[in-house]
Image (cartoon, helix red, strand yellow):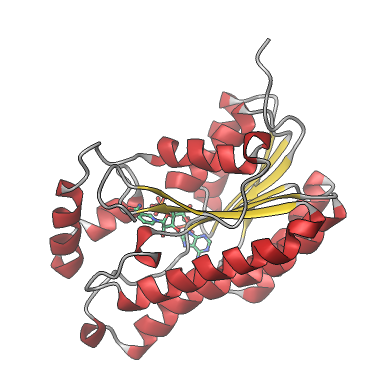
Amino acid sequence: MQQHTLGGKVALVTGSTSGVGRATALSFAREGASVVVINGRDAEAGERVRRDLAARVPGTAFHFVRADMNRREEIAALFERTAELGGGLDLFVHSGYGGSGLPDLFESLSIEQKEDAITAIFTSLVRCCHYAVPLLRARGGGAIVGVISDAAKVPTPGESVHGGALAGSGMFMRGLAREVGRYQIRVNAVCPSLIRETRNYDKVMDGGFARQLFQKIEKRATLGLPGPEDLANLITFLAGPLAAHITGQMVSINGGISGA
Ligand SMILES: NC(=O)c1ccc[n+]([C@@H]2O[C@H](COP(=O)([O-])OP(=O)(O)OC[C@H]3O[C@@H](n4cnc5c(N)ncnc54)[C@H](OP(=O)(O)O)[C@@H]3O)[C@@H](O)[C@H]2O)c1
């Protein structure tokens, strides 16, 4: 019989009513997670996705908890509720950062858009980890995986603010990994460039500067663009026992777009 790598684990995946987060929640359940908490801002969509996932993997208890990643008090309540629902937390994935703006040239972004990108990308991750670490520590260990981007590694025109915030996220995770290894907590990041079949893909391809930028980038994906399931496979690997000795890494998954 096939062994489930995440048997009995309690997981929280933020931004998981769509795209990478949703695929990750499903993958964790298929690997045996006993409780998977999904999250987003739209409660109706959340309940729809929760029902769909529960029908696909009846052995896993799925819960939807609404929280906006831009609001500290909602993040705190999300972790508190997750710990109640699961009796603790073993695995935390930060996906779907909730930035409202698209990549654009520095001079074209308003000061509000710049600050919004930093809060959505960097501050939300730090806040989530603030609440995740004590819960993982209380279980004697666990794993954190952040979905960031190759923009954290490769400077690109139009991504100075996004890339800067993402690079901050990457270095934050690497530093955190060094601190919490003593508690058997591993911290890693996955770095896509462009992911097909996601809302983000549709948004950046909708027009303007972002479309020009990403159309060029897409042509470089000699292996084809990864989809949400490809990201989910990598995240599941990093969250599970096969990656027991991997921490503090930023793993690129970009179909050959760059050697980031
Ligand atoms: N797709 C790409 O091409 C690409 C490229 C590089 C990096 N990434 C990164 O990969 C991650 C996942 O992207 P994706 O394209 O798979 O996502 P997606 O399909 O756009 O889905 C985003 C998810 O996040 C939720 N969300 C958005 N804003 C939120 C907020 N403020 N608070 C809580 N939840 C929020 C959405 O639900 P609600 O709208 O209901 O809140 C949805 O569940 C993101 O961190 C993104 O930056 C994606």
On screen, residue 17 above or below 104: above
Q: Relative to 246, is 258 on the left or the right?
A: left
On screen, residue 32 above or below 46: above
Residue for point 25% across, 36% down: 223
Residue for point 62% across, 40% down: 243
Residue 65 screen position, x and y as percent: 65, 54
- The quarter of the rendered structure image containing the N terminus is top right
Residue 78 screen position, x and y as percent: 69, 60
Residue for point 51% across, 55% down: 95
User: Residue 25: in sight, yes or no?
Assistant: no
Q: How many marks?
A: 0
- Residue 260 occupies quadrant: bottom left
Q: 1 or 108: which is nearer to us?
A: 1
- Residue 104 occupies quadrant: bottom left
Q: 218 or 18: which is nearer to us?
A: 218
Q: 130 or 74: which is nearer to us?
A: 130
Q: 36 or 153: which is nearer to us?
A: 153
Residue for point 37% across, 71% down: 163
Q: Relative to 63, is 86 on the left or the right?
A: right
User: Residue 21: in sight, yes or no?
Assistant: yes
- Can you tell me which quadrant of the image ligand 1 is in? bottom left
Outermost residue, top side: 1
Outermost residue, bottom side: 111
Q: Relative to 139, is 75 on the left or the right?
A: left
Q: Relative to 223, is 247 on the left or the right?
A: right
Residue 256 screen position, x and y as percent: 27, 44
On screen, residue 154 above or below 249: below
Residue 125 screen position, x and y as percent: 58, 67
On screen, residue 158 above or below 23: below
